[in-house]
Amino acid sequence: FSYLRSSLSGSALAAINGLSLTAANYPAAIAILKNRFGRKDVVIQNHIRKLLEVEPCVKTSAENLQVLHDELNLHVRALGALGKDLNSSRITAAEILMELFKLKLPIAIRKKWEEEIFTDETKGSDLDMFFSFLLKQVRIEQSVVKTQTLGQLRLTKAMKTTATAERVTTTSALKAKIEPRLNSCAVCNGEHTIFQCEQFLRATPDERWSLCSKRGLCYHCLYKGHLANRCSRRKPCGEAGCTLNHHRLLHQPGTKEMTPMRDQIAAEDHRIVEDGKTPDHAVLLAKSETRKNILLQTANAFIENEDGECQMVMCLLDTGCQQSLVRKKIANQLGLKGHFEHVKITRLGDSCGQHKRLQRVKFRLKDVRNNREGLSMEALCVPTICK
């Protein structure tokens, strides 16, 4: 037993290290070693594998050739001692090929094959059984990949549906929203484009601006899904020499014919002077009903409330007005909020004036050509601006 123990090292020595050095324990030690390391088929496979993995001798020298000879001879002699003498054809080509094939397998599949032949050593060199096993693994992998692919497609589709449903439109995106049907009219939901929509084409330019604002359409291309200031089709209108950046169907040929407010002004439309206060700027906000020549400078702009809702309006620039005005209809449509105050309204030629209680509302005025922050303003609500 002492001689046996002195001949062992590593895991073999550790396997019998707990046995005391007595003659009675010698049979037990042999049984443990045979059970642990006595699988003849595994030893043969290891020697064949080592032969297949021998590095080629690339340099002609006595030293290199000696190393190659010793390594090959070691494994061939070991196989002969195990009853697999290559000279007597006791080792079959199947056994050699089996080791070669196993080296080509992934580690996980190689482990499954070892489990398959663990209980029967004779199966280790059965090529037919090996190919059947390999085909079985192919079908298993195909089934798993197909299931994973279908599951991933369903998950991706569900995530896209959820993302579309939860997408919130904002003013910064100009209410841009992607619709599921690309050929559906954004105005009437008909099976045609907006350029073929009779409802949109019959509408006035003001009504078209309003429809675009409500439907979240880009003012440059009349499509959804992107910011107006990032539209690739952004260019000047071109209608009647118009240089503003908007679609030609949104072009406003003119405005309602007006005379200076200091000459013809309605009782509710004249200049409003608040006691002791003169603003730095004065803007009159209205939406015209007809398109004719104008005598006051005008500009198109967006008026935006606290919730980010906006509407296209026409700004009348009257340098003689000391207060900004906004039509009550526009203020009501956007839900503009503010406090009421008493002001004195004076019209041209009227020395007495009138005292009225009007609401002062707050809003932002933004350029139609870009999506900048805009200008914070206050204005008094009046029924009409001009007649």
Image: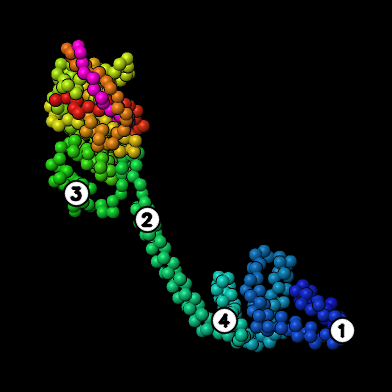
Q: Please name whichever residue, 245 or 214, is drawn nearer the observer in this view of the structure.
A: 214
Q: Earlier in the sequence, mark 4 or mark 3?
A: 4
> Can residue 221 be spotted in the picture?
no
Q: On the picture, is 127 further left or further right than 205? A: right
Amino acid under disc 3:
Cys
Q: Nearer the viewer, mark 4 or mark 3?
A: 3
Q: Which residue is mark 2?
A: 162
Q: Which residue is mark 3?
A: 188
Q: Nearer the viewer, mark 3 or mark 1?
A: 3
Q: Nearer the viewer, mark 2 or mark 4?
A: 2
Where is residue 95? Give x, y as percent.
Answer: 60, 82
**Which secondary structure lies at badge 2?**
helix
Q: Earlier in the sequence, mark 1 or mark 2?
A: 1
Q: Please name whichever residue, 225 or 118, is drawn nearer the observer in this view of the structure.
A: 225
CA gap between label 3 and label 1 equals 100 Å
Where is residue 120? Give x, y as percent.
Answer: 60, 86
**Which secondary structure lies at badge 4?**
helix
Q: Earlier in the sequence, mark 2 or mark 4?
A: 4
Q: Nearer the viewer, mark 1 or mark 2?
A: 2
Q: On the picture, is 21 further left or further right than 117? A: right
Amino acid under disc 1:
Thr
**Which secondary structure lies at badge 3?**
loop
CA gap between label 1 and label 4 equals 39 Å
Q: Nearer the viewer, mark 1 or mark 4?
A: 1
Q: Which residue is mark 4?
A: 116
Residue 2 highlighted magenta (yes or no)? no
Whether 3 is drawn above or below 369: the answer is below
Q: Which residue is mark 1?
A: 22
Which color scheme does this rendered protein use? rainbow
CA gap between label 2 and label 4 equals 46 Å
